Image: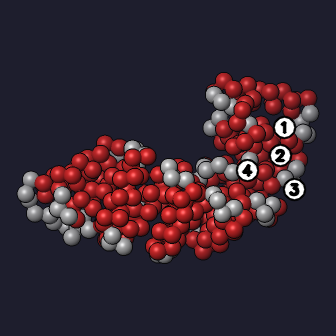
Amino acid sequence: MVFSVKNRVFGVGFYLALALFAGGASYGSAALAAETNDKEDIQNTIFRYKTALEVNPNDGKNRLKLAVAYQTNGEVDKAIEEFKKAVKLSPEEPECYMGLGRAYARKAQLQLACDNLKEAVRLAPKEAAYHLKYAQVLGRFNKLDQSIAEFRTAIKLNANDPIAHRDFGACLGLKGDVAGQIVEEQKAIGLASDNSGAYYYLGSAYAQQGKAAEAEAALKKCIALDKKNAEAYSLLSGIAASTKQFKQAVDYAQTAVNLDPDNADYARVLGKLKDAAAGMPLTKGK
């Protein structure tokens, strides 16, 4: 059946907006937080560090903080230049490489991101956040075996990070270990019951196992927490269609289209579901 949940192709890819830019043990997520509450604060922070560097351009700590401030402000190219200068001033400071890795990842320059994150991990092998970020970017680079190894290390160092379990589960799913994915998503939810991404991955994993009721329950929790997850609505439309609940399926599919109107697959599925709701037979193909 064309709407079979079990045969659906899932758009996983690490829930990238959350996974790739998740926090870490960095100036960006901690030390600058109090100074960068809004746009004006960020600009003031940038000005302050630029002024300090005019007085002492070889201050590695201020150079690093300026780089992070640029990155926080979305000025990724300027951040990269400052991180590079910080590396020259403090070549043994892992946070410089962490920052570069994050910045290159934002620009989708994944090999450069991996190279710098690998160096951060080498310099700080017991820092779970570095292993986690490296694992996430390796996964994005489709180096799944290496990604899994880094996730395992990150979780060994910090077993209480729900993001690590959530993204590890997604990576296992991409490798075909759906049972392992379910275990990790359940751990993530146990640590953070408001983790919408974990519910999404859990639902998609149950769907791949053909467990429609379990998938539906998880995906409904996902959209209760994240009403903008178009893929979750799309998966729910497939589940509803598989049990011939076409009106409900149309509602879910319409929401997916409303959230992502440029997605041709969502629009195509919505059209087929409307036909089914009107009593027309479902057909495969475009």
Q: Residues within 10 Å of mark 1 (few under 14, many from 20)?
A: many
How far across and down, in percent of the image, does residue 132 sit? 66, 60
Residue picked out by circle 2: 86
- Judged from the image, the secondary structure of the residue bearing numbered disc 1 is helix
How far across and down, in percent of the image, does residue 142 sit? 55, 67
Q: CA distance from mark 2 to mark 4?
A: 17 Å
Name the residue located 72 percent from the left edge and 42 percent from the top edge: 30
- Judged from the image, the secondary structure of the residue bearing numbered disc 3 is loop
Residue picked out by circle 3: 92
Residue 188 appears left or right of 94: left
- Judged from the image, the secondary structure of the residue bearing numbered disc 2 is helix
Residue picked out by circle 4: 25
| Mark whose residue sits in front, 3 or 2 | 3
**Three-letter amino acid code at the position of disc 1:** Asn
Task: Check if mark 3's residue and mark 2's residue have beta carbons within 8 Å.
Answer: no
**Figure quadrant of residue 112:** bottom right
Q: Nearer the viewer, residue 146 or 78?
A: 146
